[in-house]
């Protein structure tokens, strides 16, 4: 972790309508992924498990894209509070990449093959956007994808989706999702400082929606196809319940995603502080940086050993 700077206080770039402070801490979980991971580790459910597995494969590549995208703008950021938040954001995302890389290795051990799929995600989708779109458009896309991640985190933690799952994976996924909520303002606030155009924001959301829907659909379908297609009726029933009838995940996702299109939208408008605090309470992490409240004067903070 020596690549990070010594000044990483917890404060956000202020929004005039939503001056809500947000703490960002770089944590490394001490929990380990179970060696003998159940195939259907999430609620014994094929669809829920493979959607979560697919998200992990996507996150492994997507968060590298986030890091590369926001890092380019650090020299251009005039607001020092935002600059320090970006550094903390990168630190959290690097920890997430490490976890999902390890988890994907466990999926390979279970017999799943997604090497070609992951290669295409990294190079044909995120790589192509990074190479051919402007830095500003990539930032807008990253902000839109972060809104998807924030929405997934809100729904998953509010509905306790991981309550009946492998205990260690529950802790690790909930840690990641809680940190998505914790840093949800950063990329959006960076976008507002670089280009606050409403059209530019919606353009990024439109592309982000195409990317997320395509990558999640194709990756989930690939994982389900490699699972056990002989249980077609079970897969159909679980899909119908999860997406449309019982959990209604698509309906809930749509209602929250469209909030991003409101002209006065800001990620901090829907606070999840209580859920974030509950996730981190009584759980063990290695903390890389100490933190302070947003209204305290700046001071140097030392890195934990």
Image (cartoon, helix red, strand yellow):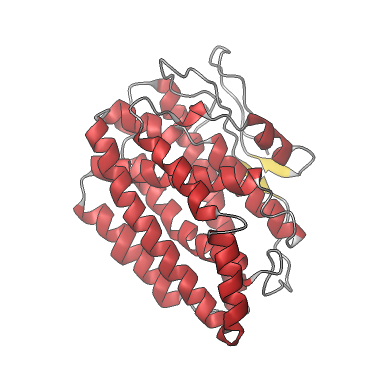
In this rendering, the count of numbered labels is 0
In percent of width and height, residue 13 lies at: 43, 23
- Residue name at image x 52 percent, y 42 percent: 91
In percent of width and height, residue 109 lies at: 62, 78
* Residue 102 visible in the snapshot: no
Going by the picture, which residue comes out furthest to the right?
A: 282
Q: In this view, does 88 lie to the left or right of 247?
A: left
Q: Which of 30 and 240 is in front in this view?
A: 240
Looking at the rendered image, the quarter that the N terminus falls into is top right
Going by the picture, which residue comes out furthest to the bottom?
A: 230
In this rendering, the answer to whether 3 lies above or below 5 is below
- Residue name at image x 48 percent, y 57 percent: 59
Q: Quadrant location of residue 126?
A: bottom left
Looking at the rendered image, the quarter that the C terminus falls into is top right
Q: Quadrant location of residue 101?
A: bottom right
- Residue name at image x 26 percent, y 60 percent: 128
Q: Which of 131 and 14 is in front in this view?
A: 14
In percent of width and height, residue 167 lies at: 76, 58
* Residue 57 visible in the snapshot: yes
Q: Nearer the viewer, residue 211 or 103?
A: 211
In percent of width and height, residue 122 lies at: 37, 63
Q: Quadrant location of residue 38?
A: bottom right
- Residue name at image x 41 percent, y 73 percent: 117
In this rendering, the answer to whether 302 lies above or below 34 is above
In this rendering, the answer to whether 115 lies above or below 1 is below
């Amino acid at each position: 972790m020596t690549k990070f700077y010594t000044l990483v206080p917890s404060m956000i770039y202020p929004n005039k309508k939503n001056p809500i402070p947000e703490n960002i801490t770089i944590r490394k979980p001490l929990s380990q992924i179970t060696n003998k991971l159940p195939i259907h580790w999430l609620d014994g459910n094929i669809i829920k498990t493979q959607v979560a597995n697919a998200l992990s494969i996507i996150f492994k590549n997507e968060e590298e894209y986030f890091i590369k995208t926001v890092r380019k703008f650090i020299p251009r950021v005039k607001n020092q509070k935002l600059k320090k938040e970006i550094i903390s954001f990168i630190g959290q995302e690097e920890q997430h990449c490490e976890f999902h890389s390890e988890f994907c290795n466990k999926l390979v051990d279970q017999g799943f093959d997604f090497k070609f799929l992951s290669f295409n995600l990294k190079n044909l989708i995120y790589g192509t956007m990074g190479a051919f779109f402007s830095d500003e458009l990539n930032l807008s896309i990253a902000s839109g994808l972060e809104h998807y991640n924030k929405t997934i985190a809100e729904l998953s933690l509010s509905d306790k989706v991981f309550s009946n799952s492998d205990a260690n994976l529950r802790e690790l996924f909930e840690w990641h999702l809680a940190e998505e909520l914790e840093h949800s303002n950063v990329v959006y606030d960076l976008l507002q400082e670089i280009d606050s155009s409403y059209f530019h924001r919606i353009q990024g959301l439109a592309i982000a929606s195409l990317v997320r829907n395509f990558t999640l659909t194709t990756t989930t379908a690939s994982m389900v196809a490699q699972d056990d297609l002989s249980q077609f009726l079970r897969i159909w029933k679980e899909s119908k319940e999860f997406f449309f009838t019982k959990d209604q995940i698509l309906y809930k996702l749509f209602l929250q995603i469209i909030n991003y299109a409101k002209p006065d939208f800001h990620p901090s408008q829907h606070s999840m502080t209580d859920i974030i605090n509950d996730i981190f309470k009584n759980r063990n992490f290695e903390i890389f940086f100490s933190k302070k409240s947003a209204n305290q004067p700046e001071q140097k903070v030392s890195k934990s050993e």
